[in-house]
Image (tube, rainbow, N blue to C red):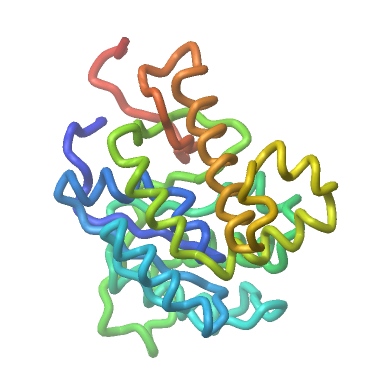
């Protein structure tokens, strides 16, 4: 059954640090409601980690880095043990991670392998897996999974009250902004970027990247909120919940 109160512990399995902020409104709402949020980042350069930590702190989440190397993520036994340990230690009520449908045609490195790794670890966390190494950690079945940024969402979280908090967290990811801007400058003419980002397009890569991410987020939030015919939210983050909702009766 749906609960009016947030579950106690929410775990975000993020391949890249930006994903924490992509669901930053949901995290902030969860923490405001009395819940705890922990995020695990599979891939993060050492120089970017302080930025990710500051962003997570603004949202109210704790964060850890799984220390995988780009191009080396694989659903092998040792990697599964690492994530099963994480899941059994955190013992989340809800896990948020990338949508498998999106991950398998995304051209960011390691997303496909990471998605298999997360799903396998969630399946094994509740089973008798690696008892010789994980004997001290009781099994923990994962009760609920939500996929972020889905192509076919079936629910949204209203983030209208916390969107400024999300944007403050986004502002911390300066390395990500610079990278995004450099990619966009190679793809798009300067005059097109100026139409999207305004004056920020000519200030610096960091300023352009932040403006592009902020504009993209606002467009998504409005599309899933105010512009949706079925939602009451003004600004919303979309999710696809794994499995069926159990309702006491049909909700309007």
Residue at image location 64% in from the left, 43% down from the top: 197
The x, y position of residue 138, in whole percent, is 26, 73
The x, y position of residue 144, in whole percent, is 36, 46
Residue at image location 59% in from the left, 31% down from the top: 152
Q: Quadrant of the C terminus?
A: top left
The x, y position of residue 57, in whole percent, is 30, 65
From what the image shows, is residue 1 above or below residue 127? above
Residue at image location 32% in from the left, 27% down from the top: 246
205 on left or right of 67: right
- How many numbered tags mark residues here? 0
The x, y position of residue 46, in whole percent, is 52, 85
From what the image shows, is residue 124 above or below residue 226? below
Q: Residue furthest bottom?
A: 132
Query: Front-most of 22 and 194?
Result: 194
Query: Front-most of 175 and 67?
Result: 175
Q: Quadrant of the N terminus?
A: top left
From what the image shows, is residue 9 above or below residue 48? above
Query: Front-most of 9 and 176?
Result: 176
The answer to which image quadrant residue 110 occupies is: bottom right
The answer to which image quadrant residue 195 occupies is: top right
Query: Front-most of 191 and 6?
Result: 191
Residue at image location 48% in from the left, 67% down from the top: 121
């Amino acid at each position: 059954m749906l609960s009016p109160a947030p579950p106690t512990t929410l775990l975000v399995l993020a391949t890249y640090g930006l994903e924490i902020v992509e669901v930053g409104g949901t995290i902030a709402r969860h923490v405001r409601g009395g819940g705890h949020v922990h995020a695990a980042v599979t891939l993060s350069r050492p120089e970017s980690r302080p930025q990710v930590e500051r962003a997570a702190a603004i949202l109210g989440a704790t964060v850890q880095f799984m220390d995988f190397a780009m191009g080396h993520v694989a659903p092998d036994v040792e990697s599964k043990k690492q994530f099963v340990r994480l899941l059994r230690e955190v013992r989340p009520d809800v896990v948020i991670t990338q949508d498998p449908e999106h991950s398998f045609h995304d051209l960011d490195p390691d997303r496909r392998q990471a998605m298999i790794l997360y799903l396998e670890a969630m399946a094994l966390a509740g089973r008798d897996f690696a008892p010789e190494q994980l004997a001290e950690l009781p099994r923990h079945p994962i009760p609920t999974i939500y996929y972020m940024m889905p192509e076919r969402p079936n629910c949204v979280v209203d983030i209208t009250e916390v969107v400024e908090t999300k944007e403050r967290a986004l502002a911390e990811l300066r390395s990500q902004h610079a990278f995004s801007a450099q990619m966009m400058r190679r793809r798009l003419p300067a005059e097109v970027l100026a139409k999207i980002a305004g004056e920020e397009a000519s200030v610096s890569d960091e300023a352009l990247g932040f403006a592009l991410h902020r504009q993209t987020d606002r467009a998504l939030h409005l599309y899933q909120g105010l512009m949706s015919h079925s939602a009451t939210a003004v600004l919303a983050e979309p999710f696809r919940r794994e499995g069926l909702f159990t309702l006491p009766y049909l909700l309007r």
